[in-house]
Image (cartoon, rainbow, N blue to C red):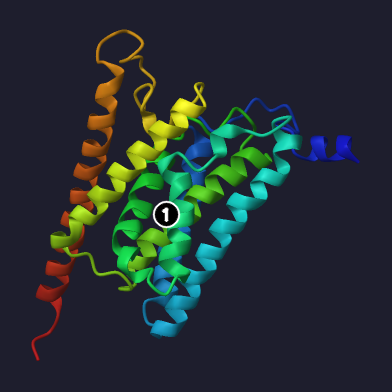
Amino acid sequence: MKNLFIKLFEMSHFNTGISITPFSIAHIVYLVLIFGSIVLGWLCFRGKTAAQKEKLLRALAYALVISYISDFFFHEFVYGGLNSDKLPFHICTVLCPLVCFAQFNRNGHKLKEPVAILSALSPMMYLCYPASVGTGEPWCYQAVQTMFFHGVLMAWGILNIALGEVKPDIRKCWHSGLILVGITFWAKLGNTLFTDRNWFFLEEDALYIGLVANGIIPKWSLMIINPIVFFIAVLAVYGVCCAVRSASKKKAPAA
């Protein structure tokens, strides 16, 4: 039975040599499917009631949690044991429990705006450059689970904003900054406990071009650079939201 599961979850089923490398055909197909699904979700639910929108967002949150937790049960067949890289120390994986709190806890609304902003932004960065999706074929379990998890996380964040469940207020952008600082220290703890990991890219640069290894920048500087870069990206998201809101008001017919 174990051999059967190992066969089902193996990286290559047809020995095609195809994998999801950045900007490859497989990568572009996944991007089209993920972004297309988000646009379709917005088109289908933008005119629905608040209760129906809430059901959609709750369903996405459930799908995210199920995808993340169930994945650990398959590590033995995929990786031959626990893959510690999937532990919740990276920004996308740590957002999973934060999404749960924001969506289901009665006080979660207090965190929903920064969590939604980061959930829209962080997986988008990953999906646009999936450097660690693995070398398996695009339809193997590892590739599908990784892209599905990041796609659902991004969908939850974007649809919260696009459907009006979260109305970004630039005056609250510092909330995202505080969460980024917390994630930085949390990831540093993970990197200290598991010395072969690079959570939140605090051991080496995000593109793995060797900025630390080649002595171009000191490793400690990444604890400052990374949250600042992410926060600048957060401000860019707020800017886009403000621009869209302003354009919508101009197009709205006068009462």
Residue occupied by mark 1:
154
- At 60% from the left and 27% from the top, the residue drawn is 135
Residue 137 in percent (x, y) is at: 64, 33
In this orientation, does residue 22 appear? no
Please state which of residues 24 and 77 is positioned toward the viewer in this rendering: 77
Residue 47 place in picture, x, y as percent: 37, 82
Residue 151 makes an appearance in the image: yes
Which of the two residues, 48 or 71, is positioned nearer the viewer here?
A: 71
Count of marks, rendered view: 1
Q: Name the spot of residue 154 as percent of width and height, x first.
A: 42, 54
Q: Which residue is drawn at 41% across and 46% down?
A: 123
Residue 202 sits in quarter: top left
Against 241, residue 43 (above or below) is below
Instruction: Tell me which residue sits at (16%, 55%) in the image.
Output: 239
> The N terminus is located in which quarter?
top right
Which residue is situated farthest in the bottom direction here? Answer: 255
Give the structural element (helix, strand or loop) at label 1. Answer: helix
Give the crowd class for mark 1: few <14, some 14-19, many >=20 residues within 10 Å. many
The C terminus lies in quadrant: bottom left
Say which of 122 and 245 sits in front. 122
Position of 221 relative to 168 (above/below): above
Question: Which residue lies most toward the top here?
Answer: 214
Q: Which residue is drawn at 13% across and 61% down?
A: 171
Q: In which quarter of the image is residue 200?
A: top left
Q: What residue type is labelled 1?
A: Met
Question: On the rendered structure, is 203 left or right of 19?
Answer: left
Q: Where is residue 42 in the image (x, y as percent from the top left)?
A: 40, 69
